[in-house]
Amino acid sequence: MYIGQAAQRSGTTIKSIRHYEAIGLLPIAERLGKYRVYDQQSVELLIFIKCAQQLGFRLKELQAIFAGHQGSQVPWELAHQAIATKKQEISDRMAVLARQHAQLVEFEQSIEQAQRACPLATL
């Protein structure tokens, strides 16, 4: 299939596909004359890249997953490791945000108590 059809099937854009090839995320497609030709594995790889980006992976992180990998197959073992790492990062951020939220609630309550105690607050 040509690049337009690969873009349509994967939900990406032609520009994105060219960019992924340029940065090494997607193997450079074979050519039929002047046209790039993609197979179903390339489309699956494009879908994986798009999904990973929507879930918070940066292109640099995806490049690390595919570093030294040849072909258009997703290196699933490395992908699983990267997903586990990303989940831990998110859990850590959630814990920090939960602490920050609790501190904000506490701060808000202390302000409310201070206003009630201050006689100038009723003026």
Image: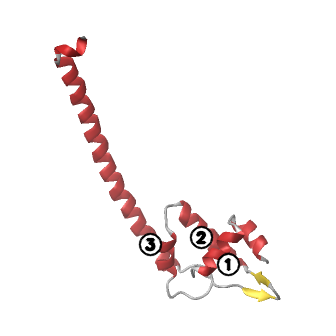
Question: Which quadrant of the figure contains the C terminus?
Answer: top left
**In this image, 89 relative to 80: left or right?**
left
Residue kind at label 1, given as amino acid type: Ser
**Image mark count:** 3
In the image, residue 56 sits, relative to residue 79, either above or below, namely above
- For disc 1, the marked residue is 42
Q: Residue at x 64, y 69 (%)?
A: 47
Mark 3 element type: helix
- Looking at the rendered structure, the kind of residue marked 3 is Ala
**Residue at 63% in and 80% down:** 21
State whether residue 42 is above or below residue 31.
above
Which callout, 2 or 1, points at the residue further toward the start of the chain? 1
Label 2 environment density (alpha carbons within 10 Å; few <14, some 14–19, many ≥20) = some
Q: Earlier in the sequence, mark 1 or mark 3?
A: 1
- Per the image, the residue denoted by label 2 is 48
- Image coordinates for residue 105, horizontal then vertical, percent: 28, 35
Mark toward the start of the polypeptide (3 vs 2): 2
Is 80 on the left or on the right of 91, as rendered? Answer: right
Across and down, in percent, residue 96 comes to 30, 52
Which residue position holds label 3? 82
